[in-house]
Image: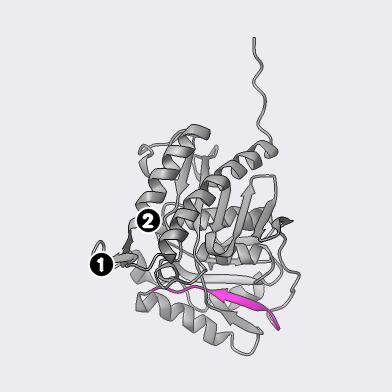
Amino acid sequence: MEETREETPQDLRNLALKVAGLLEEAGQHALHDQLNPRNLAQSSTENADRGPRYKLEVDSKIMRFMSARIADIAHFDGFWTTRPAESHPGQRYWYIGKIDGVINYIRRMSEWTVTAALFEFGPDNEPKPIIGIVHAPALGLTYLAARGAGAVRIHKTAVGEKRDKVVPSMTSSLDGSVLSYGMSFLPDESQRALDVASSLAGRPADIKRVGPASLDLCKVADGTYDAYFEPMLHVWDIPAIAAGTVVVWEAQGTLSRWDGERIHWRHDNDVVASNGLIIRELQHYLQQYPWPDSINQR
């Protein structure tokens, strides 16, 4: 009788490395399209009051490529977007992201990513990401993490590949820190972010606004930023957020909603990530601008 070998953190990391290789392939196609002088996006009227304003042709290419190739490596129970209405403890679903950082992409900036996350349903039947990969093709950067196996940053240069363990900064105060924040094209959501940034004036050494969210999370994990906050990440942002979240967790950073509660993987969220040392100070400012009741009524 053949024995079933128990899965180890290294098994999950090896799987993450394989999927990272696929994302790099997909990312090269997307980068080629970005550098090709043509119109990259069409305006979208889908969910015009809340949804994405642009539709990228390359997104469908990424989804088809990744779905087909992942099925050959480790299909598990399928994909998040086609999972059944009811899931059960132990089931696993891949969530492949579209381009994260659409505006940056169509404006031919370098800060955009392709992402993948593996969700597992726990004993409480709640989903949790256990593998996250964030690949930034134009920057030559890949971040990947797997439950219990830590996080790694892979930087491809002209002289070869460099791999580093991902660890957050040791900044212990908002004074002199470097923060990042995200914002939406919707006025009420953006105003909430700008209000927090304004209230922080005079304490951080700098407050960056570059994006996308997945890359901002990874930059908290690797110590580039001391913290990152965003007032509204929608359900369509979940694959990107989930991928970056695993990197933050495995780097021993912190991530939550602004009120300290856990992220809800089926709903909209506000998000704050930090090195774990300045979160209490930062939450003092965030909690002055609570989650608007109007959002829940949409």
Residue extent of the magenta highlight: 175-184
For marks 2 and 1, give the CA distance.
21 Å
Q: Which residue is at the far top?
A: 1
Q: Position of residue 159 (x, y in %)?
A: 70, 59
Quadrant containing the N terminus in the rendered view: top right
Q: Residue at x 65, y 72 (%)?
A: 225
Q: Mark 2 or mark 1: which is in front?
A: 2
Q: Position of residue 179 (x, y in %)?
A: 61, 76
Asked if the residues shown at circle 2 and circle 1 are in contact, with their CB atoms under 8 angstroms apart, the answer is no
Of residue 258 and residue 110, the one placed in the foreground of this image is 110
Residue count near mark 1 (Cα–Cα under 10 Å), binned few <14, some 14–19, many ≥20: few
Q: Quadrant of residue 32?
A: bottom left
Q: Residue at x 59, y 88 (%)?
A: 201
Q: Is residue 243 above or below residue 223?
A: above
Label 1: which residue?
48
Q: What secondary structure do most residues of the magenta stretch adopt? A: loop
Of residue 233 and residue 112, the one placed in the foreground of this image is 112
Check residue 58 in the rendering and tell me which mark sits there, or answer none. 2
Instruction: Give the color scheme: rainbow, by chain, secondary structure or one colour.
Output: one colour
